[in-house]
Image: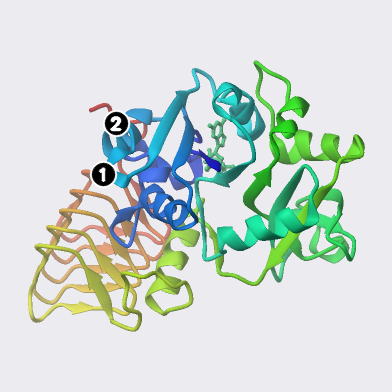
Amino acid sequence: MQAIVLVGGEGTRLRPLTYGTPKPMVPIMGVPFLARTMERLYAAGIRDVILPAGYMPQAIMDYFGDGSQLNMKITYVIEDVPLGTAGALKNVEQHIHGRFFVLNGDVLTSMNLRGMIAAHEKKGGIGMLHLIRVEDPSAFGCVVHDAEGRISSFVEKPPRETAPTNEINAGTYLFEREILDFIPAGRNVSIERETFPQVIAAGKDLFAYTTDDYWMDLGKPEQYLGAHVDILEGRMPMLDIEPGVPYFAEANVAIDPTAKIGPNVVLGSGTRVGARAVIRSSVLWDHVTVGEGAVIDEAIVASRVRIGSEAVVGKGSVIGHDAVVDDGQVLQPGARLGATEPIKR
Ligand code: GTP
């Protein structure tokens, strides 16, 4: 079986991080998120992956190459203009040979792909959508289905009080090749807004696969940080991570013994933390320098950032690649610092 991982989005909500790193390459516990997705696909027996890309594709291609190091085959198809979540599938039609998975490139979930394949084989239909239940569905695409799981309608971001269900589209699909016949070629098409409703209207069966697995869309800074907290506290299982430690550090990290780090901190490789610095609930990428007495709280700090002595990085701040926070500088909560356009390398 093949899998298509959608990796062409600009990741505007994660800016300025995505000015230096495309969203699929943003690290989760020190490993590019797409590499973790590849591991999951491999574990499900999938060896043939198609990546419709467009935004900073070189960073993805440089890392994964043709996939042979992972014992997989990776085909890249670059979009000159973004084609949307369904247009991207139509654009790779010539590479698709049969049944295939589609994964949103920014969904972290423990859902077992083999379980979904088995469910689809049992139910039949043109496709199956992974759904999860959330408390408040108002920010998501709700999916209504009957007791058999047959989907009848899609309601995008309904007000909480009138939401028809709390089951939402979790961004993993399993399709028969025939679904491609419903997608027009050569233009931007949204699978959620256009293709799914059209498939239903044509009388084709789409089934729901609702599970209680861990699920997080990594599209926004608070979700990215929240996912790390969930991994560090053991709610999202990850084979190489031991939950419950105050912080997770990669190679070559130097921490002054008087610094206070944790809970829920990730330190990328080559990070230096000075005396009396305090870091809480934050993710620091590679080669970040934290000066003496600096305070970082609930922040994301990209590669090679320098945080000066006695600087304060307010809650919810996002600091892009190579930025400098001066000695004594106070960043207000929710600050954004760094590049204002894609960094050319
Ligand atoms: P925002 O700009 O922050 O909304 O992020 P995004 O551009 O990644 O959009 P969104 O989170 O809605 O995208 C969901 C998934 O679809 C991500 O994995 C994107 O990479 C991918 N995606 C979105 N639009 C396109 C597109 O036009 N082409 C391709 N190939 N992938 C896309």
In this view, the residue in front, 225 or 316, is 225
In the picture, the quarter occupied by the N terminus is top right
- Label 2 element class: loop
At 87% from the left edge and 62% from the top edge, which residue is drawn? 148
Q: Amino acid at mark 2?
A: Ile
The residue identified by callout 2 is 343
- Per the rendering, the mark at residue 32 is none
The residue identified by callout 1 is 321
Query: Where residue 225 appears, x then y in whole percent?
Result: 42, 63
Q: Label 1, label 2: how many angstroms apart (C-alpha)?
A: 9 Å
Query: Where residue 258 appears, x then y in whole percent?
Result: 10, 81
Marks 1,2: beta carbons within 8 A: yes
Q: Amino acid at mark 1?
A: His
In this view, the residue in front, 327 or 228, is 228
Query: Where residue 167 appears, x then y in whole percent?
Result: 75, 63
Q: How is the image coloured?
A: rainbow
How many residues crowd around disc 2 within 10 Å: few (fewer than 14), some, or many (20 or more)? few
How many residues crowd around disc 1 within 10 Å: few (fewer than 14), some, or many (20 or more)? many
**Image quarter for ligand 1:** top right
Upstream in the sequence, badge 1 or badge 2?
Answer: 1
Is residue 16 something that shows in the picture? Answer: no
